[in-house]
Image (cartoon, rainbow, N blue to C red):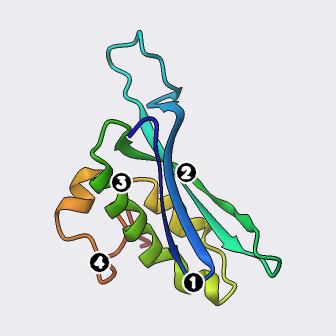
């Protein structure tokens, strides 16, 4: 997965996930046995000219290791799309949603994640 970019397009929205050299504390340090290379997702919207434009505040590092099978990465972009497409189609901000989606990991995708489940690490107010 380290050398791949997986994307998913639905209408005028595209979600990509790839490894861009990040680890647990920022940059990935291969010599640090406690560091893990992590995948980053980014969301794009197709402009009227057909070009893909990065959506503001929609690119975040995840908790998914860059060593995951490409099928897991594909499931991740599909899962992210279920949370960002409708708000983007309605011209709403997805910043808070993407912040929460940055916490996705393999367990999120393996156990019951889907459009009827909230993104992980949802904020609670009292």
Of residues 103 and 45, the one drawn nearer to the viewer in this rendering: 45
- Distance between mark 1 and mark 2 Cα atoms: 22 Å
The image quadrant that residue 54 belongs to is: bottom right
Give the labeled residue for mark 3. 73
- Distance between mark 3 and mark 2 Cα atoms: 14 Å
Quarter of the rendering occupied by the C terminus: bottom left
Classed neighbour count for the residue bearing mark 3: other residues with Cα under 10 Å, few (<14), some (14–19), many (≥20) = many
Q: Are marks 1 and 4 in contact (CB under 8 Å)?
A: no
Give the labeled residue for mark 1. 11
Which mark is first along the chain, 4 or 1?
A: 1
- Distance between mark 3 and mark 4 Cα atoms: 19 Å
Give the labeled residue for mark 4. 117
Q: Nearer the viewer, mark 3 or mark 2?
A: 3
Which mark is first along the chain, 4 or 3?
A: 3
Q: Are marks 1 and 2 in contact (CB under 8 Å)?
A: no
Give the labeled residue for mark 2. 60
The answer to whether 63 appears left or right of 11 in the picture is left
| Residue found at the very far top of the displayed protein | 31
Instruction: State the image coordinates of residue 42 (x, y, percent, origin top left).
Output: 58, 57
Instruction: State the image coordinates of residue 113 (x, y, percent, origin top left).
Output: 26, 70
**Does dot 4 land on a helix, a strand or a loop?**
loop
- Distance between mark 1 and mark 4 Cα atoms: 22 Å
| Residue found at the very far left of the displayed protein | 111
Instruction: State the image coordinates of residue 27 (x, y, percent, origin top left).
Output: 55, 26
**Does dot 1 land on a helix, a strand or a loop?**
loop
Q: Nearer the viewer, mark 1 or mark 4?
A: 1
| Residue found at the very far bottom of the displayed protein | 90
Quarter of the rendering occupied by the N terminus: top left
């Amino acid at each position: 997965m380290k050398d791949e970019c997986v994307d998913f397009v639905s209408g005028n929205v595209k979600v990509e996930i790839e490894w861009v050299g990040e680890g647990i504390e920022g940059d990935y340090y291969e010599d640090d046995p406690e560091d893990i290379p992590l995948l980053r997702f980014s969301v794009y919207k197709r402009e009227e000219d057909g070009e893909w434009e990065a959506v503001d505040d929609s690119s975040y590092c995840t908790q998914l290791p860059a060593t995951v099978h490409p099928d897991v990465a594909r499931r991740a972009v599909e899962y992210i799309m279920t949370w960002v497409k409708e708000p983007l189609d309605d011209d709403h901000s997805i910043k808070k949603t993407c912040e929460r989606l940055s916490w996705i990991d393999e367990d999120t995708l393996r156990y019951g994640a889907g459009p009827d489940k909230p993104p992980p690490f949802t904020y609670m107010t009292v």
